[in-house]
Image (tube, rainbow, N blue to C red):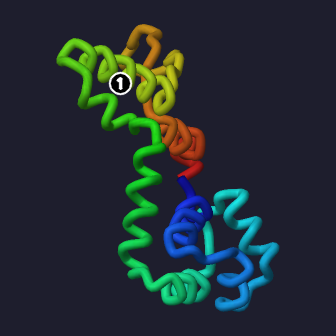
Amino acid sequence: MGFGKLLEEKMNKKGIKQAELAEAVGIPKTTLSSMILRDNTKIEIEKFLQICEYLDCDPEEFYNEFREQSKKNMPPSFTQKYYALDDFGRDVIDTILDKEYERCTTVKVYRAAHSEDNHEDEIVKMSKDVLEKLKNAPMTDEDL
């Protein structure tokens, strides 16, 4: 439930018509009507305070009621879902998350550079940041 529907509910409880409230707070009736019809969640703070004053309701209580209604309509967050899982489910998610994090933050580089230590060619994993630094590093002592 957005601000518009909650406002409409409070107006109905007090028996206040849209035209009356719109005139009292100095906004066009069409604006108020649109706010209610579209169930807007945004309103200028000054208008909100004027509306609360006219409806004789505490702005903090109005806002808290709006937040509670909004929470009821929200799907559970990732965190809520994660902690609702058993140990097996959390282990599965942790494993997938670790693998995806590694995939997104590291690159595999084929190491085949000529060196004096006669190392074998290999694939090395490194972060994308380290790879960028290597790309910009001097190639020879003369480049230093």
Quadrant hosting residue 140: top right
Residue 56 makes an appearance in the image? yes
- Image: 41 above or below 118: below
Q: Is residue 31 left or right of residue 142?
A: right
Residue 2, image x, y percentages: 56, 58
- Image: 92 above or below 9: above
- Image: 3 above or below 124: below
Residue in front for this viewpoint, 56 or 74: 56
Residue 75, image x, y percentages: 45, 37
Residue in front for this viewpoint, 36 or 45: 36
- Residue at left offset 49%, top offset 18%: 111
- Residue at left offset 44%, top offset 54%: 69
Q: Which amino acid type is marked by label 1?
A: Asp
- Residue at left offset 33%, top offset 20%: 93
Residue 113 makes an appearance in the image? no
Say few, some or many: other residues with alpha carbon within 10 Å of mark 1 (under 14 / 14 to 19 / 20 or more): few
Q: Is residue 48 left or right of residue 38?
A: left
Residue in front for this viewpoint, 43 or 98: 43
Give the SS element for disc 1: helix
- Image: 3 above or below 96: below
Residue 67, image x, y percentages: 42, 60
- Residue at left offset 59%, top offset 65%: 8
Residue 47, image x, y percentages: 61, 85
Quadrant hosting residue 68: bottom left
Q: Which residue is mark 1?
A: 98
* Residue extending furthest toward the front: 15
Q: Count numbered badges in the picture.
A: 1
Q: Is residue 5 left or right of residue 75?
A: right
* Residue extending furthest toward the top: 120
Q: Is residue 96 left or right of residue 28?
A: left
